[in-house]
Amino acid sequence: MTQITDIDHLYQLRASLHFQGKTIVLASGVFDLLHQEHQKFLTQAKAVGDILLVGLETDARVRQMKGEDRPLNPLSIRLANLAKLNLADYVFALPDNFGHSKVRQDFVLKLHPHILAVSDQAPYFGEKQRIMKLVDGQVLIVHPYNPAISTTKLISKKQT
């Protein structure tokens, strides 16, 4: 069963998971309107490890990335909807300042995941590889990006 948690709890949990020999997979995104590509991505991310942690961008960060009219669903709803899918072990909110490289690096250094699961169109791929090397982890493309299905496309279709 998926648990909604916070970053501090994950930091505390990390040592226990590593001690148990669990492979920790980290994924992140907006997950505004959940669709089949989200489900495929998360299913494939879960398949490459033992524990799947999914970080969601905050509402403020989504507005920075996608515009003032997004997200359609507030963070609390997005977390609850993702938890209902029961694909991740833990879902949590990323920091508001997650757009800064240093914040992302510090987060990974403290969490120490083994695998960062991404799609083949993930932004900052080189930076993600560099950061994951600092913890002897890897960036793993677990799902091809499908440009035909995205939240932005779904919103556009509804408006026409």
Image (cartoon, rainbow, N blue to C red):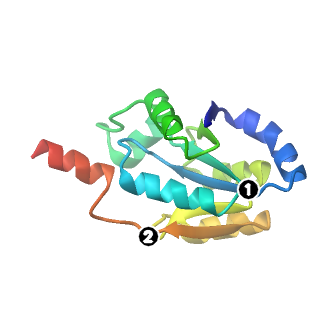
Q: Position of residue 12 (x, y in %)?
A: 82, 37
Q: Position of residue 107 (x, y in %)?
A: 70, 48
Q: Which mark is residue 136?
A: none
Mark 2, Cα crowd under 10 Å, few <14 / some 14-19 / many 20+, is some
Residue for point 85% across, 52% down = 18
Name the one closer to the observer, 22 or 70: 22
Residue for point 73% across, 50% down = 106
Q: Position of residue 68 (x, y in %)?
A: 31, 37
Q: Secondary structure at mark 2?
A: loop
Name the one closer to the observer, 136 or 142: 142
Residue for point 78% across, 40% down = 11
Q: Looking at the image, which residue sits at the far right?
A: 19
Relative horizontal placement of residue 74, taking residue 159 as reference (left or right): right
Q: Which mark is residue 113?
A: 1
Q: Which residue is mark 2?
A: 144
Location of the N terminus by quadrant is top right
Q: Is residue 59 above or below residue 116?
A: above
Residue for point 59% across, 39% down = 91
Q: Earlier in the sequence, mark 2 or mark 1?
A: 1
Relative horizontal placement of residue 155, taking residue 7 as reference (left or right): left
Give the Cα separation between the discs numbered 2 and 1.
21 Å
Mark 1 residue type: Pro
Mark 2 residue type: Pro
Name the one closer to the observer, 102 or 139: 139
State the image quarter where residue 30 is shown.
top left
